[in-house]
Image (cartoon, coloured by chain):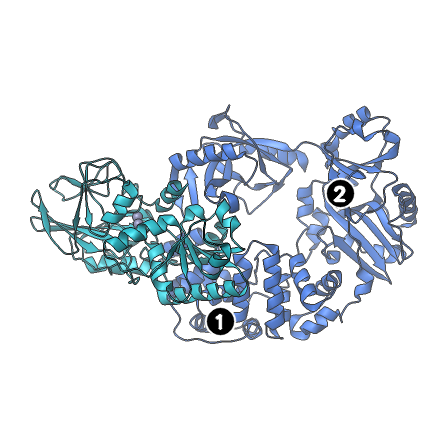
Chain colours: A blue, B cyan
Amino acid sequence: MKRFTELIQQLETSNKTNDKIAALVSYFSTADEKDKPYVIAMFTGKRPRRPVTTALIREWAIELSAIPAWLFAECYHNVGDLSETIALVLPPANHTADRKLNEWITDLALLNGQEDSVKKEFILRAWDSMDTQERFIFNKLISGNFRIGISNKTLVNAIARQSNTDSNKIMHSIMGKWTPDQITYQELIDGAHVNTDNSWPYPFCLAYALDTEPANLGETTAWQAEWKWDGIRGQIVKRNGELFIWSRGEELVTEQFPELHFLRDELPDGTVIDGEILAVKDGNIQAFSILQQRLNRKTINKSQLKEAPVGFFCYDIMEVQGIDIRNETLSERRKKLVELMSLLTTRDIVVLSPAINFENWEQLIEIRKESRANNSEGVMLKKLNSLYHSGRKRGDWWKWKINPYTVDTVMIYAQKGSGRRANHFTDYTFAVRDGEKLITIAKAYSGLTDLEIKEVDSFVRRNGVEKFGPVRTVKPELVFEIAFEGIAESKRHKAGLALRFPRIARWRKDKNATEINTLEDLRQLLASTL
Amino acid sequence: MALISFTNKGIFCKQGGFYIDPWQPVDLAVTTHGHADHFKAGNKAYLCHELTKPVLLQRLGIDLPVQTLPYNKEITINGVKLSLFPAGHVIGSSQVRLEYKGEICVISGDYKIEYDGISTAFEPVKCHTFVSESTFGLPIYNWQPQKEIFGKIRKWVTDNHLQSKTSVLIAYSLGKAQRLIKNLAGDTPIYVHQSIANLNDGFIKAGVELPPTIRITSDIKKEELQKGIVIVPPALADGKWMKSLMSASTGICSGWMQVRAGRRWKSADAGFALSDHADWSGLLSAIKATEAEKVFITHGFVSTFSKYLNEIGITAWEVNTQYGNEEEEEILKGA
Ligand SMILES: [Zn+2]
Ligand SMILES: [Zn+2]
């Protein structure tokens, strides 16, 4: 497991994607053959059943380290990660064992269904053979919860580079059905269990943010306007009887959206369409927060399907009857898309994203103001003669977003930033009022000028109430207006809700802490967007 | 009446008429060590260990009345017997032992238990009242032996050389820098920032044996630095100069690097949990060794640590001081 431990350390010590990829490439070039599929499984969230509960692990760690439970809790509070806290408080090991990662994982799986006493003996003996780093990894193996900031994309790029294989092919392969105990690394690369030719997606065509008055775009007749939906940009590929759904992050998300699986039967082979995955209920597009309940889940249950059903709003079409039509103009492609839609027999789930009718720019400005009412983020402007570019091209597609929501908050914690601003307090936590209490509502890192940062910094130094490792509790005095894109219910946050893309809009020096918004204000906003 | 009291100027010995590490100007400041949070300019006179004097002069920039003492030598001030004992924190760092009418009180400043190879090793002193820091007073902070940490640092330097990266270690000018120099000295040349070089010169003049280092000047080519080990204070961790180096790899040497969140928070390429403060078990063993009836806990995890001490039968009190901002002060100085 030492080699894997080393990999994790390397992945954690660098912020640069290139370094991470280099570390992964080196790992896949040198690691134990049998370990590799397990690592890929772990990093892509293929989790084995947790053999021991968190409560038991915690109990045994407290017992072994001979510290009171409250002190353990204090440590956990400071470290912020249970696996790491346990690794740090345990007494030093008495012997060493150099077992392979796949052996540990296999043995842990065998603990399922055993008596607690058997589990305890196994875990305690394992801890007693490991250093702090290995214990941390081992505890993560138990919880199966390996969040170390490696996206599927990064992992895929590394494997692609290591094996000299196309990355889309690797993505399809590792998102397919396989288990680490029954496949080799080479078989995964070869995609022996999937047909990667079928899944091939196109790079998405992207838009720049509109940075001028729409009137400067010229004649309205040259443009198509659409709503800019606030969902997940997706690409649907149907070839040789197989259906694939890719997300904008170039991840395969086919299994997450069973509502769209009817397309396997209804779309002709050799079809690729571009659109937006949205939560749609009774024909109405829902807020992003509803869709969020469906994201990043390995399994979808009935109640989620019922609570947050999805639909697909089609923007464009790139392949018809197996022929790449990205070099045709938007108006030509649109015709083909409309035609395709008319072939579908299942109605109201996969639909054409409507074009907005408008006579002149003034009218469109008025229409755009209604964006929020239909849960859109604004308007898209696409030139009717534009081709479907790979990536961004200036001038053809524009996104014209409406202004964000705002809330007035007070700063309650500050932490030093990183990189250029490592010596200044630049990372802040903001709260709104809830009766007498202040309740955390957002963290934000950006939005102030260097001068303002220096000013806040000196305030923090003078008014730090408490120091908790790197975090300072500050006197709640400075009021900031936070802009955000949406609001969602959240059980993980004390406030019971979470803001989407919060950032500092401006420092409200004109306001004091008694004038900030309340949690009730935000609850009302949440209710109004559901 | 108690021998010491905690006032808004600092730790005060009324009978002796002096303060220990005061943060506001007083007549006589007994100074445990030269870190900026324990030592302020503006006092009328200072009393410290003979190897702390060069630091004070360096930092004050002017000649001030500084009286010095070697370890273990007793003097009497207004009837109070005063002596200094090694604290093992940095070169010259001292615990201050006070005795008056049979009552003994020890103010330890900052300390660590493990011998670091350059600062005189910590010596436990029996007393009735003990004042202890608690910078790393949580059981998650238990240091590895420094031999192992230096092994890791050396391996890191070798790896950097192989990848044509410049190894830059971030360390306080006072203490950590000398410790690194002493323990990393060998075939690889060590380049130090001028704030470190100045302190080293002072130490060498005062008779400390330090391995040779090279002061970084604009004449030194970046290619040369790349072949050596570069040591700079935290103030430089982030500046233009670092960017001018040939693909610098930065390694922070600090106890906070023990925890992943601490490492992530600093955008260093590597973190080494090398601290000049006592770890959890070090704090506990030091406090027990004093056999003190009463313990005062200053800067760090003050309330958690005192609560734990009381639970295990050691009477401990929380004290509010202005110590504990070593790092920031250093940054401001360098800026
Ligand atoms: Zn110190
Ligand atoms: Zn201190």
Toward which corner of the image does residue A384 lie, by quadrant? top right
Secondary structure category for the residue under label 1: helix
- Please determine whether, in this image, residue A184 is positioned above or below residue A43: below
Where residue A189 sits: x, y (%)?
Answer: 72, 69
Q: Residue at x 84, y 44 (%)?
A: A351
Q: Quarter of the image for the C terminus of chain A: give it.
A: top right
Residue at x 27%, y 48% (from the top left corner): B55
- The residue labelled by disc 1 is A119
Q: Nearer the viewer, residue A191 or B274?
A: B274
Locate residue A488: give its quadrant. top right
Task: Indicate the quadrant where residue B140 lies.
Answer: bottom left
* In contact (CB < 8 Å): disc 1 and disc 2: no
Q: Earlier in the sequence, mark 1 or mark 2?
A: 1
Q: Chain of mark 2?
A: A
**What amino acid type is highlighted by mark number 2?**
Lys
Foreground residue among B265 and A411? B265
Name the residue carrying label 2: A281
Using the numbered discs, state the Cα–Cα distance from disc 1 to disc 2 in whole angstroms: 46 Å
